[in-house]
Each structure stands twice: as structure tokens, then as C-alpha cells.
Image: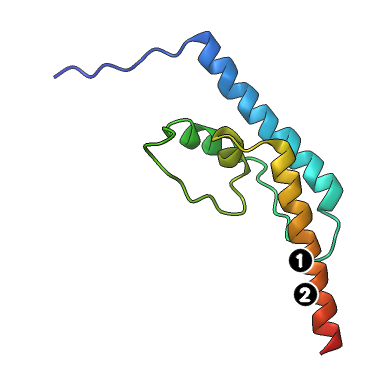
Amino acid sequence: MEISTPSLTTTFIRDLYARMLLTRVVDDYAWRLYGHVPNGLLVSCRGHEAVQVGSAICIEAGKDFTLPYYRDLGVVLTIGMTPYEVFRTYIQVREQVKVAATLAMIT
């Protein structure tokens, strides 16, 4: 029984690298913006870029689904979320944390 493996083209490898680099850049920038905020609820995905992109690249739109969690930045960027949408999500979460903290102090 012979097992064949598909060959990886240079274009595909560059695409994977670009996705990993985008994940690292967005993560670094988010960390600089929000990482110092107490209870900012931002957790870095540093060091997990290859695993996240590699697992997400196998997902076929309209056929498969994924349930990413808060550290799956590489997954959400690979399946189509834009950096703008990622930062918009971070801003919304940060605002919700501020409201919750304010409400906790009032009660």
C-alpha cells in the first residue's frame, strides 16, 4: 500500500507564511494597545500562529465549521475575518468590561 502526499507549491507556502505573519502582527499590535489594561481580557496567541493557520487552512467554506475561542486569532484571520473586525471585537469587549466594572462598583 503506497501513501501519496500532495506536494506543497511555493505559492501555497508563501500564503501560509503571510497568514502566520499577519496573525503575529495583529497580535503584537493588539497587545501593545490593550495588553497593559487591567482586566483587558486580551490573551496573546504568540507562538501558536503555525498551529492555528495550519488547522484553519483545512477548513472548507460552506462544508466545515469551527468554533474558535478567544486565543484563536490565527484561525479567525485564516477563515476570513479581517484585522479591522478583530480590533472592533477587542474594542467592544473592552467597553463591556468597563461597563461591568462600573456596575459592580455601584451595587
Question: Dividing the image into 4 quarters, which one contains the N terminus?
Answer: top left
Nearest to the observer: residue 66 or residue 53: 66
Question: Circle 2 — which element?
Answer: helix
Q: Residue at x 54, y 39 (%)?
A: 52
Give the residue at the far front of this rendering: 62
> Is 51 in front, or is 97?
97
Question: In the current view of this chain or complex, which residue is farthest to the bottom?
Answer: 107
Q: x%, y% of residue 91?
A: 79, 53
Give percent across and percent down for residue 48.
Answer: 59, 41
* Drawn side of residue 63 relative to residue 14, left or right: left
Between the residue at mark 1 and the residue at mark 2, the CA separation in whole angstroms equals 6 Å
Residue 40 visible in this rendered orientation of the protein: no
Q: Quadrant of the C terminus?
A: bottom right
Residue displayed at 83% across by 65% down: 38
Q: Which residue is mark 2?
A: 100
- Of residues 41 and 90, the one nearer the viewer is 90
Amino acid identity at mark 1:
Gln
Q: Which mark is residue 33?
A: none
Q: Is residue 69 left or right of residue 41?
A: left
Secondary structure under badge 1?
A: helix
Q: Is residue 106 visible?
A: yes
Residue 100 against residue 55 in the figure, above or below:
below
Asked if labels 2 and 1 touch by Cβ distance under 8 angstroms, the answer is yes
Q: Badge 1 is on which residue?
A: 96
Label 1 crowding class (10 Å Cα cut-off): few <14, some 14-19, many 20+? few
Q: How many marks?
A: 2
Q: Residue at x 39, y 12 (%)?
A: 7
Amino acid type at image mark 2:
Ala
Residue 82 position (above or below residue 89): above
* Image quarter of residue 73: top right
Picture coordinates of residue 93, whole percent (x, y): 73, 60
What colour scheme was applied to this rendering of the protein? rainbow
